[in-house]
Amino acid sequence: MGLLSLGRASIDHIHTKLIKSLMNLMGKKLIKPCTPTYHNLRTHKLSFIDEVNPTMSAASINLYYRLNECNRRVNNLEKSLAQILPQFYPFARRYRKEDQLVDSSNQGVEFVEVQVDCKLVDIIGLEDLNDLLLLEVGAANEVIDPITSLQINKFKCGGIATATSISHRIADAASLNTFLYALAKASQESRLNLLSQNLILHYIFQVRI
């Protein structure tokens, strides 16, 4: 699999509105961690820097050329997500803004599958790829909002676009990249030998009283 650079495409007649009409929701579920969280990690308090962060999400969209056994790879990605979530335990939870912490609910990461009735090359060159998503790339500010969402877009040519969105209160771009790297390693069925994600910022920058 390889990441494509988003350049101008020779095919520019397909517009966002048309793409949206070609997108069909195939399934939506919540993926929970494969093992329970340790008792001492039941809640995750925010640092005061995170408290004042705007209510927005960090997002990443990756495009991949034609893949063999696409459905098997997507199923494997779903299992790998459950496998790595114990390392990234706040990502599967919900934010309680009245307490300014992430609770212990482990409700899960939102996992969405979409079939797109066009080829991957048809979307290269679009100015705003966010408009292609069924996910709302915005704030995860309510207790019912998933902190993390992952959408898999499958194209007619066998290509895939993965879109990941996470609350900026919980993770920055570097944390999101670490999460995606761990997910890629796990989905390749190779030995996952990563340091646990550093989530101790709240110990350094204490909550304001």
Image (cartoon, helix red, strand yellow):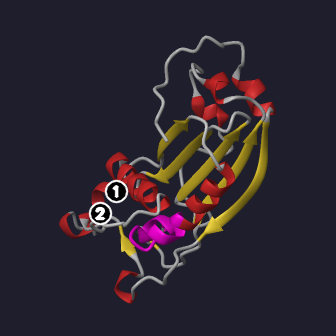
The label on residue 146 is none
Residue drawn at x 72%, y 46% as measured from the top left: 114
In this figure, which residue is indicated by the disc labeled 2?
A: 47
- The Cα atoms of the two marked residues, 1 and 2, are separated by 5 Å
Q: Quadrant of residue 205?
A: bottom left
Vertical order, 156 against 88 (above or below) = above
Q: Position of residue 11 (x, y in %)?
A: 66, 13
Q: Residue 103 or 127: which is nearer the viewer?
A: 127
Extreme-front residue of the structure: 68
The magenta region covers 80-97
Is residue 208 visible in the rendered structure shown here? no
Secondary structure at badge 1 equals helix
Q: Quadrant of residue 154?
A: top right
Residue drawn at x 34%, y 56% as measured from the top left: 50
Question: Can residue 82 be found in the magenta stretch?
Answer: yes
Q: Quadrant of the C terminus?
A: bottom left
Q: Residue 155 or 30: which is nearer the viewer?
A: 155
**Mark 1 burial class by Cα count in 10 Å: few <14, some 14-19, many 20+:** many
Instruction: Tell me: 156 left or right of 107.
Output: right
Q: Residue 9 or 88: which is nearer the viewer?
A: 9
In this figure, which residue is indicated by the disc labeled 1?
A: 50
Q: Position of residue 194 (x, y in %)?
A: 30, 65
Residue drawn at x 37%, y 81% as measured from the top left: 41
Is residue 72 visible in the rendered structure shown here? yes
Q: Are marks 1 and 2 in contact (CB under 8 Å)?
A: yes
Instruction: Tell me: 36 left or right of 131.
Output: left
Identity, as a three-letter code, of the amino acid under mark 2: Ser
Q: Residue 163 or 121: which is nearer the viewer?
A: 121
Instruction: Tell me: 133 left or right of 33.
Output: right
Q: Position of residue 135 (x, y in %)?
A: 64, 46
Instruction: Tell me: 155 left or right of 203.
Output: right
